[in-house]
Amino acid sequence: MASGASPQLQMRLKSSFIGDRLLRCSTSRHQPLPQLFRYNPGTKHVSMQLSRTLSGLTNLFFNRRNLDELPNSKRKRLRPGKVSPRRQVPKNIPRPPYVNSMIPPGIASGAEVHDKKGIECMRASGRLAAQVLQYAGTLVKPGITTDEIDQAVHQMIIDNGAYPSPLGYGSFPKSVCTSVNECICHGIPDSRALEDGDIINIDVTVYLNGYHGDTSATFYCGDVDDEAKKLVQVTKECLDKAISICAPGVEFKKIGKTIHDHADKYRYGVVRQFVGHGVGSVFHADPVILHYRNNESGRMVLNQTFTIDKARHRNRHR
C-alpha cells in the first residue's frame, strides 16, 4: 500500500484544485506553485499565473509577441469571462466535510481500501458521474457558454440527490470543471461561449451516499482541426493503456511509464504539474498518481480506487 504523499506531491495536488486560484493567462515569471491559480470573488473573474520555469507548456502559451493569437492558428487565445454567482444546493442533500471551508483539505494520507458497502457506494457514485458527463457532452456546441453547461450539470446532480463535489472545495465557485483549449484542467465555467473548433474537457465529480465519483472526458465543439483531434485521440489512448495495466500488486509508477512511452511515440510531452489521486469517501487521497516516468514507490491494492487524470499533452516539436 502506498505511504503518505510527500510534501512536494501534496503541494502539486493542492495547487491543482483550489477555488481561489484558478485560470487566466499571465506572464508572471516567478510565482511559487501554490500561487499558480487565482480566483478573485470581487471581480468574479478567474486568473492563471503560470511560471515560465514550471513547464514547457508556457513556451507555447506565453513566449510570443502577439498574446492574442496562437501560433499557426487563426484562433484567439483563451480569455476569461464573468463568473456567475454560486448555485444553491437543497439543504437535504448531504455535503462533503470541506464545504463552506475556505481552506482546501489537500490530500489525505493513507490509501482507502473499500469493503463491500464501499464498493457498492463507489459504483453508484461513479455511475452517476458517468451519466452526468455523458449528458454534459451532448450540450457541447458553438454558442453555448461553459456557465450554461455548469447550470445543466448542477441541476442533474442535485436532481439525483447528490452534491457536486467541486462546489465549495477550497472556495471553488462552480459545480463542474470546464477546461477549454489551452486551459490544462480545472477551469472555472464562465460567460465565454464555446466557438467552432474548440475542444473542451469536462470534469465531473459527484458526492453520493458519502462517496465521490470522479470522471472526465474531452469533447469536440463543431469542426475541430486535425491537430486538435490527434491531441485528444492520443491522450485518450494514453489513458486507456494506463487503465489496462492496473491490477493488484502492480507498481503505481508503471502508470506513468505507460503514459509517457505512448506520448513519446507521437512526440508529445506530458504535463507534470497535475496528478491523479485516490478517491472514495475522501475527494483527494493517497495514492498520488504521476503521469510521467518516475521512481515513486507503492503498489496497487485490491478494492482501491484512484483516478488517472487525462491531462492534456503538447507537441514537443512543432
Image (cartoon, rainbow, N blue to C red):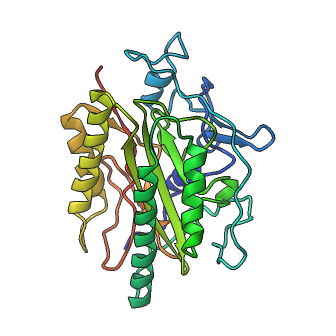
Comparing 255 with 65, the one in front is 65
> Image check: 120 left or right of 95?
left
Question: Looking at the picture, how far across and down is residue 198, in whole percent?
Answer: 43, 33
The N terminus is located in which quarter?
Answer: bottom left
Q: How many marks?
A: 0
**Would residue 282 be seen by someone viewing this image from the given angle?**
no
**Would residue 105 be seen by someone viewing this image from the given angle?**
yes
> Image check: 246 left or right of 61?
left
Q: Quadrant of residue 45?
A: top right
Q: Is residue 17 above or below residue 162?
A: above
At a point 30% along the width and 19% down the height, the residue shown is 318
Q: Is residue 31 above or below residue 216?
A: above
At a point 58% along the width and 52% down the height, the residue shown is 150
At a point 34% along the width and 66% down the height, the residue shown is 298
Comparing 238 with 250, the one in front is 238
At a point 66% along the width and 53% down the height, the residue shown is 172
Q: Quadrant of residue 233?
A: top left
> Image check: 69 left or right of 41?
left
Question: Looking at the picture, how far across and down is residue 139, in whole percent?
Answer: 46, 48
Question: Looking at the picture, how far across and down is residue 115, in whole percent?
Answer: 40, 88
Q: Residue furthest top?
A: 65
Q: Residue furthest left?
A: 265
Q: Is residue 190 above or below residue 110?
A: above
Q: Residue furthest bottom?
A: 116
Comparing 68 with 291, the one in front is 68
Question: Looking at the picture, how far across and down is residue 214, in whole percent?
Answer: 45, 63
Comparing 39 with 86, the one in front is 86
> Image check: 316 left or right of 86?
left
Q: Is residue 164 above or below residue 318?
A: below
